[in-house]
Image (spheres, rainbow, N blue to C red):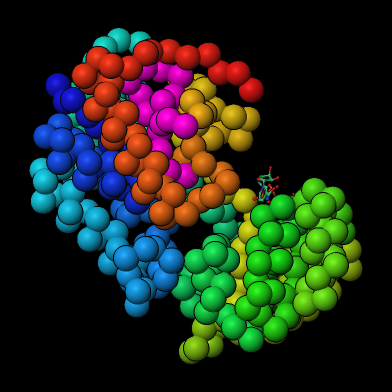
Amino acid sequence: MHKAVIIGTGPAGLTAAIYLARANLEPIVIEGPEPGGQLTLTTEVENFPGFPDGIMGRELMNNMRKQAERFGAEFHRGWVTSVDFTNRPFNLSVDGMSDLQTESLIISTGASAKLLGIPGEKENIGRGVSTCATCDGFFFRGKEIVVIGGGDSAMEEANFLTKFAAKVTVVHRRNEMRASKIMQDRARANPKIEWALNTIPVEVLAGEQGVTALKGRDASTGEEKVIQTDGIFVAIGHTPNTGFLGDKLETDDTGYILVKPGTSETNIAGVFACGDVQDHTYRQAITAAGSGCMAALDVEKFLEGNRVHDWSITL
Ligand code: NAP
């Protein structure tokens, strides 16, 4: 039986692993199909404090992992298929290894940016295709950018990117926007934003230097058009990676785990959540790392028996 298991190896899970390992709790860390999480999909990270010259996302995550291993965290590759919180210790079924029993659990499985699934998209991530304006906007100073989506994320990203870009074209598959009126109004009032509505993205076109254009199709006439661009930001939403939980934890109606405000506690005592799996607002590496630290400290308190268990969610 283990004292603590962490599922997920993004900045939240790895920070929790560093803290728990340093507290001699010998955490077991389960690495899923995307070790290191979303940061390994980006190129240079310039806003993580402590790296004045920036650091590559993959390198940052490798360093965090080494730091956790140095203090005794144990990593296993596997896919958690189900969890049983009805008895203590909790039981985790993990593909690729035998079941795990643990007194406490940290869930830091993150969220995945939705992709369009069109040709040229995945292979050009980091070469002009991005799912994170905060991470990558800076690289598009004076350039022309396309933002895909019609929700609040797309409006927010488009507005943010006008700080850098010469022009931002919002491409949306319908004429009506899903975004809130205030976000739409703000984007519409921005002179740097142009609109390609009723346009279904069909293909990302790229050359040796990266993205060159987005090919789209008019949703009414079927006519194809090519929008020349230096970068494409896909902003069609995120999905929290909570499928393996079934309905065993309280989540909001989009699947994000609910935690007691100001803590990492879920509605089940001994189960904690940190990082993007419980945060659809900030979604930054540094906020994820901070919440991972909180989860580790909450686990320590829980294992010492100092935590009041169970809470009712009041919204
Ligand atoms: P969202 O509201 O689900 O919007 C996703 C957009 O992407 C929709 O316009 C959708 O088009 C489009 N889309 C989805 N799949 C597509 C596909 N395969 N091809 C082309 N377009 C596709 O997601 P979100 O904008 O990320 O927002 C998620 C939640 O976070 C919302 O509740 C939002 O209010 C909130 N949020 C709030 C703020 C803020 O208040 N500052 C900022 C960001 C997000 P259709 O409309 O045609 O379905």
Residue 262 in view in this figure: yes
Q: Quadrant of the C terminus?
A: top right
Q: Residue furthest bottom?
A: 208
Which residue range is magenta in the image?
262-276
Left or right, residue 209 beside residue 74: right
Viewer-closest of 273 and 92? 273
Left or right, residue 220 beside residue 26: right
**What main secondary structure does the magenta stretch of the protein show?**
loop
Q: Residue at x 62, y 51 (%)?
A: 237
User: Residue 153, relative to residue 233: is it above or below?
Assistant: above
* Residue 39 sits in quarter: bottom left
Q: Quadrant of the N terminus?
A: top left
Q: Residue at x 16, y 40 (%)?
A: 21
Q: Position of residue 150 (x, y in %)?
A: 75, 56
Viewer-closest of 211 and 13? 13
Q: Residue at x 53, y 35 (%)?
A: 256
Viewer-closest of 101 and 161? 161
Q: Position of residue 279 (x, y in %)?
A: 52, 41
Q: Position of residue 19 (x, y in %)?
A: 22, 41
Give the tally of numbered discs: 0
Q: Is residue 265 magenta?
A: yes
Q: Is residue 130 magenta?
A: no
Residue 74 in view in this figure: no
User: Residue 167, relative to residue 246: is it above or below?
Assistant: below
Q: Position of residue 209 (x, y in %)?
A: 50, 88
Q: Residue at x 39, y 63 (%)?
A: 48
Q: Residue furthest top?
A: 87
